[in-house]
Every structure is written in C-alpha cells, then in structure tokens.
Image: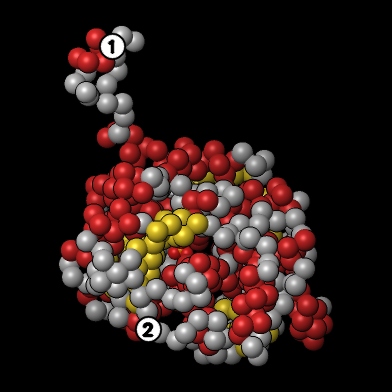
Amino acid sequence: MSLQTIATAADSAFGPAAALSCRECGERFPLTPIFACQECFGPLEVAYDLPTGDPEALRKQIEAGPNNIWRYAPLLPVPADVAEKPNLNPGFTKLVKADNLARELGITGGLHIKDDSGNPTHSFKDRVVAIALEAARTFGLTTLSCSSTGNLAGAVGAAAARAGFRSCVFIPHDLEAGKVVMAAVYGGDLVGIEGNYDDVNRFCSELIGDPIGEGWGFVNVNLRPYYGEGSKTLAYEIAEQLGWRLPDNIVIPIASGSQLTKIDKGLQELIKLGLVPDKAYKIYGAQAEGCSPVSTAFKAGHDVVRPQKPDTIAKSLAIGNPADGPYVLDIARRTGGAVEDVTDEQCVDAIKLLARTEGIFAETAGGVTVGVLKKLIENGQLDPAAETVVLNTGDGLKTLDAVAPTTGPSAIIRPTLAAFREAGLV
Ligand SMILES: *Cc1c(COP(=O)(O)O)cnc(C)c1O
Ligand SMILES: [Zn+2]
C-alpha cells in the first residue's frame, strides 16, 4: 500500500485521527503500525483534527452514545461505527463518591474513586486494548500480542477471543496465580518468560523485527500509539461523571507511565474543545517503593529516569524502565503535582483501608495509589481542601496473595452459640 492509499483509508477507519506525530520533533507520519519516529526515534502519538463547533452539541452526542468508551468515538482513532464491531466494550465504570475514605484521610474538598475494576477483565487495560484491537483490525493483522505485567495479557486474550483474532501473549513467568489463569483461560497462547517485565519487553521488540512477528499486532509495542489513546477515556469519563467539569487533583498509578500521560492528554482536549470549563488541575503519580524509577527521579529533581530492578508485590506496576517516565515527570512538574511511592506494607494497609471504608477491593496497584494519596496528604503535598479523584485500576481478586497472609476469619468455631460466645466477638 502506498502512503497515499493508507492516508485515504485512514479517513474513515481512524475517525478524527489525522496522523501519527513524534512527541520529540513533531514530524508527522501516516496512520500505520509504527511506533518510533523515523527522524529521531522519538515515540509517536496519534494527532487529531478534532471536531470544531458547538461543544453543547458534542456533549449531547456523547451523552446519547453507548454506556462504554465508544460514546467518545468522536475523540478516538476509531471508525464511527466502532460500537457495532465485536469488542469487549469496556469503560463507563463507576465514579464512586468516597466520603468515608475522605473522612479517614482528612480530605474536606471531596474525594471520588474511579473504579476501573469494573471493566470486562477487571482492570483498566481493557480500555487500551479495545483501541489497539480496532487498529489491528484495520491494518489486517491477525495475531494479537503483548508484553505484560499481568493485566494486559488477560485483556488481550479476552478481546482477541471475542473479536476472532489469534492471540499469543508474553508475561514474566512468576506472576500472581489469578493473573496467569486470567491470561490463559480465553484460549490463546500464554508464554511465561524467565525474566522480569523489562526482559519480556526486550524479547517482544526482537520478535517484532523477526519474520515470525509478521502480521502480529503487539498492542503495547507496534500498536502503542493507538493503545495509549484508550487511557484518554478515563479523563473523559471522570469529567462527564462530575457533570462536565474537572477535579483539582487526580492520583494515577505508574507502570510505563502511558496511562498518566494520556489522561493528561484527554484533560487538555476536553478544555480545548470547550467540553469543560478551563481550569488548572494537578496530576500525581503513584509507584511502589520497590519499583520507583519515576518517583526517585521526581524527588531528586532529575529529568532522566534511571532504570531499576523491580522488587515489589505490586507486579502490575513493576516496570523498571518506564517508556513514558520522562513525560510523567514533565506533567507532574507542569501541573504542580508530584510523584510518590509507598512500601509494600503501606500498599497492603491501603488495600484494607479502601475495602473497610468504601467496600472496594483493589488489587495491589490500587493499594499503591490509595497509599500514595494518604502519604501525599500527610506530607502536605496534596491539599485536602481540594477535590481529588483517585484511580483504582484493578480488582483485588487478582492479587489475593497480597492480603491473604494478614486477612482471614475472625474465628473458627464449632456450630454452637456457646462457641460463638466464647470467641469473644459479642
Ligand atoms: C498496566 C497497569 C497500570 C499502569 O499502566 P501504564 O499505562 O503502563 O502506566 C496501572 N494499574 C494496573 C492495574 C495496570 O495493570
Ligand atoms: Zn521525531
């Protein structure tokens, strides 16, 4: 296919998306399965000709759409009829007003939890996979793949099954049982790699360059520009669910940093389109101490993110060499936010705090994020009088091992009233 034909085909297949553009030098490329700038090797992202005109009409169009991410199709690199194609249709998860947790943390300005455990495979990854899958369909790719810290593998396996793709996904061999089962149950191939995520990722980059990888769509490698756009829907949903306005603060977990940077991109678009009133917001990033390359750089005032060897129970966030790390630093600094980290013990405490205050059982990534929120307030880095949204990106059932050692029955008794009385619970 010539570049000209691709660009023309893209007009309808990619909706409002106009091109891929380099985040470093701004050079533009046609919408193809490439991820690095051919001039400077910088990462590519999707650039748009976004709808102009009456924001009220656009708000109405969105509100009349389906109760999933496709209500935002006019702002995504997908065809207008995307909702009719076989897809898992993630998104429009609950924004929970968390008054109990707010009271416990001393937040007076309002606190919401954006609970993405409600997605089809119980993590936020269904959003990014949904967009990458549509790109794979358009490009005629037949195998869906990824390098994953766990959740992505399950999201790819499930979406591929539903949409009729072959799938072959790669994970570090030592992940939580819940994630391994969820990655394998949808019937695609699951390969455990002897190494950590960064080894898996390096392996996948090699595979893409090999003839074996022809026809393969790695959602977070050669389809990464499209994949990333799925995270913008978190920004759109938070704004719409607050009544088309932005909160003061958003606290977001960081693995590769893609989610955080694309939420910021989504917030900027909302303001530019006039869908929400313009306002300053602060973006905060959350990491586990055992894998904290971005928070370490933030606290040291560095622009360069030095890779780490991950050692944390928050395996879904265990990326030691995060591709979007420098962009996360820029966003946290530009918006007046911060990047912090918590220990594994603080993560477990935060999982239990969220569960006992709001009835939400988060995976370790959610524990890290709520734990960081608590720490930011204690440090005086996040204003408790401001309105805050905190993300829970995954379901606690996926990481039972994190809490199992310190959680269990209050008592085990014979089935008699006497025994219950003796147990000291009443
Ligand atoms: C992948 C993942 C993240 C972060 O993703 P990035 O976009 O790579 O920063 C956060 N939470 C959960 C549960 C995840 O699976
Ligand atoms: Zn470039």
Viewer-side residue, 26 vs 206:
26
Estimate the x, y position of residue 330 in percent, counting from the top left: 37, 81
User: Residue placed at 66% from the left, 82% from the top?
Assistant: 57
Viewer-side residue, 330 vs 190:
330
User: Residue placed at 50% from the left, 72% from the top?
Assistant: 243
Q: Residues within 10 Å of mark 2 (few under 14, many from 20)?
A: few
Q: Amino acid at mark 1?
A: Leu
The residue that mark 2 highlights is 280
Q: Is mark 2 within 8 Å of ligand 1?
A: no
In the rendered image, the vertical position of residue 369 relative to residue 187, given as above or below: below
Q: Amino acid at mark 2?
A: Ala
Give the left or right position of residue 43, taking residue 212 as reference.
left
Whether residue 294 is visible, yes or no, is no
In contact (CB < 8 Å): disc 2 and disc 1: no
Estimate the x, y position of residue 345 in percent, counting from the top left: 24, 47
Viewer-side residue, 364 vs 213:
364
Estimate the x, y position of residue 402 in percent, counting from the top left: 34, 41
